[in-house]
Each structure stands twice: as structure tokens, then as C-alpha cells.
């Protein structure tokens, strides 16, 4: 019996969608998949990812040994930043997701992908969630940003601006880049858990790379099932945190009035441009048309 066995997946979640991880039920093959994914990503990321990510891996003792036991991770994470990781059965409702973040709980999928999905899967698994997201939760400023995002999400539900806030999450937590003394680095979980986008986001000539601006990001569309055509760059996690320590109500009201959405390839006069992309990848049909 593995973690994806119907008897296990039939477990009834609590009202806030928490379930037990049941770490002992992972099979040798499921642990082997984690090890293979981990080794591959560590080789690829190397100096492409911000140093804080590697520090987080070390602080939590996340390694190639197999799927982590969340109880052990939480012992270290609670001491460092007051966060914990909880298991959920699948993608959860927005209000529940925000409630967890606002209380320093990160929801992670319990299942792990199979070998046919090593390069891409639609619903985030434990490798994406734990390897991709959790290391940066050891960093106090980023941990504070994630809590603030959860609190902001609960407010956004009242203002009918959930789409705008989803864009902020997408272009920072999932697909954000940082400008460092050594050049652009990645920190977004959607990138660091991806073999191919880890390289594409930094080295391909196709995408635009623009400096982060809160309202600009919240009004920019995104692509959910392919490489991004634009990435937004921060100078530090402090910049990201400071940008969200404002009253969002006037911002929501302004965006509701204008109803403006920027396209994936738009570059505005006000944008600070790191790279004006060729968009050659998108013009060629993208990853889904040329799957490896």
C-alpha cells in the first residue's frame, strides 16, 4: 500500500482540509522518486537560486534521503520562524488557504508524482510544495511576507479582488526572480522545483524580465501551463515585504475602477527592464507543442 492507495486517499479531511501525512505509508519507489527529483534539482539549481534557499535546505535537513517527515520538519521550522507545514489532500478553497497562511501554516500536498510526471504535473505534489516552498519559510522576512499575504487574501475576498492577489502570488512566491550582486537568481517555488524552467527563466532570451511593482504585477495576466513570458525581479525579500505593508483597499478600488489587465508581453514606459525578450519561445508554440 502506498500513499496514493484508494484506502489512504479516502481519508476524510478536517474542516480546514488538514489530513495526516502518514509518512510510514510511502513506498520505496515513492521515496526513490523524491531522491531522483532532489538530486536533479540540486545539480541544476547550484548557483541559479538565491543563497537563502540553500540555507533553508540545510536548516531543515532536507536532503536526498527520501520524502521528508513533516513532524520532523516542523520541529525545526517552528523554532526558526513559527511556521509549520500541514498535509492537505489536494488544492484547497481560497479562504481556507489564506486562513492557513495567515496563521503560519503552509498547506502541502501529500502525494508525490509518478515517473511519467517527473518534468510536469498540473496539481502541486509534496516535492513542489516542500522542496520548492518550505526552505524559504526559514527566512524571517520571507516568512513574514507569506503571513501578510494570507492576511491580505482574507481581505481580498471581501473586495472581490482575488484574481489580482493570485497574480501577486504567481509572480513572487511561484515565479519570482531576485537581482543580486552575482546577477539574477530565482526564488519562486514553481521555478526551483522545475528542471527546465530553472534554466529558461534566467538564461533564455525569450521572456521579458521586469522589476517588481505591486500594482503592475497585480494587473498582469499569467500563463498557468507553460513557461512564463514575463518574470518580475525584486532586489530583496525586504522590498517584497515592504511593498505589501500598505493599505490594499485603495489599490483594490483603483484596480476595480480601471479594470485594466496587462498582457504577457507588454512593456510599459514605467517598467524597469532587465531583459526585453524576443518571445521566440512563445511564438514557436511553447512547451506543450514541443514536449520532450
Image (cartoon, rainbow, N blue to C red):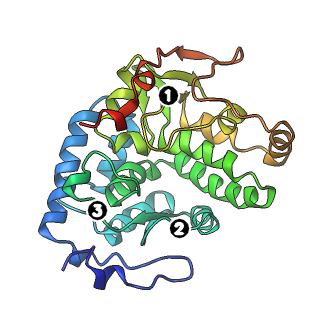
**Lower position in the chain sequence, tag 3 or tag 1:** 3
Q: CA distance from mark 3 to mark 1?
A: 28 Å
Q: Nearer the viewer, residue 60 or 45?
A: 45
**Lower position in the chain sequence, tag 2 or tag 3:** 2
Residue lying at 18% horizontally and 63% vertically, measured from the top left? 31
Residue lying at 40% horizontally and 34% vertically, measured from the top left? 50
Label 3 crowding class (10 Å Cα cut-off): few <14, some 14-19, many 20+?
A: many
Q: CA distance from mark 1 to mark 2?
A: 27 Å
Residue 197 at least partly seen = no
Q: CA distance from mark 2 to mark 3?
A: 17 Å
Is 25 rendered above or below residue 238? below
Image location (x, y in percent) of residue 99: 62, 67
Residue 289 at least partly seen = yes
Say what secondary structure mark 2 lies in.
loop
Residue at image mark 1: 229
Image location (x, y in percent) of residue 17: 51, 76
Is 261 rendered above or below residue 157? above
Quadrant location of the C terminus in the rendered image = top left
Query: Left or right: where does residue 222 sit relative to residue 69?
Result: right
Q: Of circles 3 and 1, which is in front? A: 1
Residue at image mark 3: 112
**Lower position in the chain sequence, tag 1 or tag 2:** 2
Residue lying at 17% horizontally and 54% vertically, measured from the top left? 35
**Mark on residue 92?**
2
Residue lying at 44% horizontally and 68% vertically, measured from the top left? 90
Image location (x, y in percent) of residue 91: 48, 64
Amino acid at each position: 500500500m502506498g500513499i496514493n492507495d484508494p484506502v489512504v486517499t479516502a481519508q476524510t479531511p478536517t474542516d480546514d482540509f488538514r489530513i495526516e501525512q502518514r509518512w510510514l505509508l510511502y513506498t520505496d519507489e515513492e521515496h526513490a522518486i523524491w531522491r531522483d527529483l532532489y538530486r536533479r534539482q540540486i545539480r541544476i539549481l547550484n548557483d541559479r537560486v538565491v543563497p537563502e534557499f540553500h540555507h533553508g535546505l540545510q536548516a531543515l535537513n532536507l536532503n536526498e534521503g527520501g520524502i521528508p517527515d513533516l513532524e520532523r520538519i516542523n520541529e525545526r521550522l517552528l523554532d526558526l520562524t513559527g511556521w509549520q507545514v500541514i498535509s492537505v489532500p489536494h488544492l484547497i478553497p481560497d479562504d481556507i488557504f489564506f486562513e492557513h497562511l495567515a496563521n503560519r501554516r503552509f498547506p502541502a500536498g501529500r502525494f508525490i508524482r509518478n515517473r511519467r510526471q517527473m518534468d510536469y504535473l498540473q496539481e502541486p505534489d509534496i516535492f513542489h510544495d516542500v522542496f520548492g516552498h518550505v526552505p524559504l519559510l526559514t527566512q524571517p522576512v520571507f516568512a513574514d511576507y507569506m503571513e501578510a499575504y494570507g492576511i491580505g487574501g482574507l481581505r481580498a475576498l471581501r473586495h472581490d479582488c482575488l484574481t489580482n492577489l493570485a497574480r501577486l502570488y504567481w509572480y513572487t512566491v511561484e515565479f519570482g526572480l531576485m537581482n543580486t550582486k552575482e546577477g539574477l537568481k530565482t526564488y519562486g517555488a514553481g521555478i526551483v522545483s522545475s528542471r527546465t524552467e530553472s534554466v529558461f527563466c534566467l538564461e533564455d532570451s525569450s521572456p521579458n524580465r521586469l522589476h517588481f511593482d505591486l500594482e503592475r504585477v497585480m494587473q498582469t495576466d499569467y500563463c498557468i501551463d507553460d513557461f512564463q513570458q514575463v518574470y518580475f525581479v525584486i532586489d530583496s525579500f525586504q522590498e517584497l515585504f515592504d511593498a505589501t505593508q500598505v493599505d490594499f483597499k485603495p489599490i483594490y478600488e483603483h484596480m476595480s475602477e480601471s479594470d485594466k489587465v496587462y498582457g504577457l508581453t507588454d512593456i510599459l514606459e514605467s517598467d524597469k527592464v532587465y531583459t526585453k525578450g524576443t518571445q521566440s519561445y512563445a511564438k514557436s508554440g511553447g512547451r506543450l507543442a514541443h514536449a520532450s
